[in-house]
Image: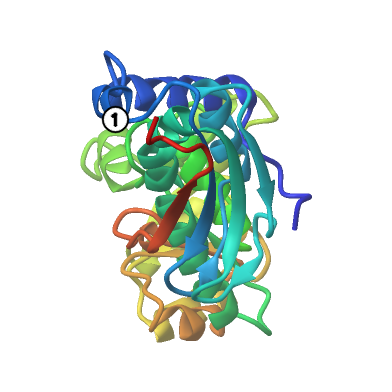
Amino acid sequence: MNHILPPDQPTLERIVAAALAEDAPWGDITSNALIPVDATATAELAAREPGVFAGIPVLETVLRQADASISVQFKVQDGDTFDAGQVLAVISGNARSILLAERVGLNLLQRLSGIATQTAAFVAAVAGTAARVVDTRKTTPGLRALERYAVRCGGGHNHRYSLSDAVMAKDNHLAVITDGGRKDLTEALRAAKSRLPHTVHFEVEVDRAEQIEPVLAAGVDTIMLDNFSLEGLRAGVAQVAGRALVEASGNVRLETVGEIARTGVDVISSGALTHSVRSLDLGLDIHISTDISH
């Protein structure tokens, strides 16, 4: 799955530089004290448990920033599944440099592979339906670009990247623009839409069935049914009848996403893909190549 669009390189460079600066602000004094400057090493990135891999461009950036002479050979591609005990990559180069990069590289790879693995499970659960599994803005501050890449590696899709990318009117927005229900919802949404460029996607969240028709009358692109029951989702899909995309959101879990998909919704968004995912257990086994006894 190496066709997956990676994060842009300037963003990768910025995130990795910050992580390395956090971990070794004045260098790695342990390795500098114990490891000869000319010692070389080979290290194997190994899986301690099965999962889906994500993070090739991230690890490449970490290694290059630590020491451009380090070489890495990947045994899997982003989006590939792997088994426990499988070697995922082989890294060779200066021992001090590999040790400098080790923790930052592992932290990021473990996090991203955990997200890809979780996403792949959600995608498998909706197989056979037309529903698209998407992420949310519930990401780790500063790591959104990487975590959303991991979602793509797991076969999922991305929602709007930020508040700047699309209009998504939620309950608090609707309360303000209708003055707590004293103004007409359809007119308020139409007025807002008239101020937007024609390229901007317009989505509105509703939390009860009686809001559906007034929102659709405003000509929105997507209507989000938030925390609807399965029966409510099925009824909502029938009521919308193709006049807008239908998104299901709210308390979407792996145990429920398949049933939600079978209601006929077009999109299912879940913060669980990123906000509370468990990092996978990956390890780096280092073998020093140079005799350090001299």
- Comparing 171 with 267, the one in front is 267
Question: How dense is the environment of label 1, judged by Cα within 10 Å: few (below 14), some, or many (20 and up)?
Answer: few
- Vertical position of residue 66 compared to residue 48: above or below: above
Q: Quadrant of the N terminus?
A: bottom right
Q: Check the picture and name the quadrant holding the C terminus.
A: top left
Residue 120 visible: yes
Q: Is residue 59 left or right of residue 33?
A: right
List x then y, in percent, for residue 163: 44, 31
Q: How far across and how far down the image is residue 9, in percent?
A: 63, 24
Vertical relation: 22 (above or below) 185: above
The residue where tag 1 is placed is: 34
Task: Spot the residue most to the right.
Answer: 3
Kind of residue indicated by mark 1: Leu
Q: Residue 34 appears at what percent x and percent y?
A: 29, 30
Locate residue 141: give its quadrant: top left
- Expressed as whole percent of the image width and height from the top left, the position of residue 181 reads 25, 45
Q: Residue at x 42, y 70 (%)?
A: 48
**Residue drawn at x 60%, y 40% as measured from the top left:** 92
Q: Which residue is more in the foreground, 33 or 292?
A: 292
Closer to us: 249 or 234: 249
| Left or right of 93, for residue 143 | left
